Image (cartoon, rainbow, N blue to C red):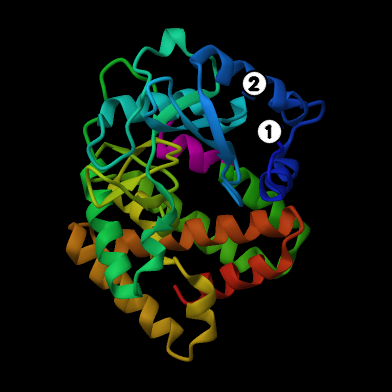
Amino acid sequence: MAFEPPPRLVRALGETAPAGDDWLAQLPAIAERAVARRELTVERVQVPGGRSSLVVLVRRADGTPAVLKLAPPRARPESERAALAHWAGLGAVQLREADAEEAEEGVLLLERLHPDVSVRSLPEAKALLEAAGTLRRLWAEPPAGQAFETVAERTGRQAAAMRAGAEADPEVAPLVDAALAAREELLAAPPEHRLLHGTFRQSKVLAGERMPWLAVGPDPVVGECAFDLARLVRDRVEDLIAAPSGPSTTRRRIKRLAESLEVEQERLRGWTLFRAVESGVRALRVGRPKDAELLLEFAGWL
């Protein structure tokens, strides 16, 4: 079959592709080799799919359903593989190929979940509860000998881009200054050192068979738990912005999540501010002004 990347993936990778990157052009051949090597039967490409990888629903030679995931090097798929191997299915999707040396770079064979049923389909309060419970199971001691990126390293790169964005658009400068100040204060004394999902949100939690809900698509990082939880605070941001009670709902959400997952409320607020501003400035940079407006208005509440 033709492994046509969904438009969503093409747009997202186009926003971040370095000069000369031809991964999308090579993707059909990469997918065909991966399928043939594993003797897989292809059912369909998952659409709309994600923003950083091609997801293909397949069956193994014995008929077992599985997922073939293909990602470019800049999406750090080998870091994802290492994190999934460490979690070993506790709170996260399982690898179906344990030996990383035998797998091609950027190719993951995974347990099949229910790709069209995420925790985001639940009512808001229930969705937050289930998502938070899943996230808690992922916060493990980092594996020895595995060099995951740290929160300080990742946010350091992001901070540089945010400063450049503030110079290009002075209207966002006050929020960028506040976010960068919060980052500096938070990094001065992190309370714990855990392996984190890195991009956790409601849509990253899918229904499963062996557990009701399991996380997918990590971009793992090592640092404090409040950093991981911060992205969950702004889930359904478009609904928050549309509601007159948006600011007060956000404050209650921070308080509820901080208490339920035993993180400091002010640290969660600080990382929520940083991550919202970073996402808003990035949306401006790649030409998504509507997304940027939502994110920066949300950040202004914090």
Taking depth in this image into account, of 200 and 70 the one nearest to the observer is 70
Q: Are marks 1 and 2 in contact (CB under 8 Å)?
A: yes
User: Which residue is at a point 58% across and 47% down the rendered structure image?
Assistant: 49
Q: Which residues are magenta?
A: 148-157
Q: Could you classify mark 1 by the number of other residues whose Cα lies within 10 Å: few (under 14), some (14-19), or many (20 or more)?
A: some
Disc 2 element: helix
Amino acid type indicated by mark 2: Glu
Q: Classify residue 16 by image quadrant.
A: top right
Residue 55 appears in the figure: no
User: Which residue is at a point 43% across and 24% down the rendered structure image?
Assistant: 60
Residue under label 1, please give it.
3
Instruction: List the single residue furthest toward the top.
Output: 101
Q: Is residue 105 above or below residue 149?
A: above
Image quarter where the N terminus lies is top right
State the mark number for residue 32.
Answer: 2
Q: Is 271 on the left or on the right of 211, as rendered? A: right
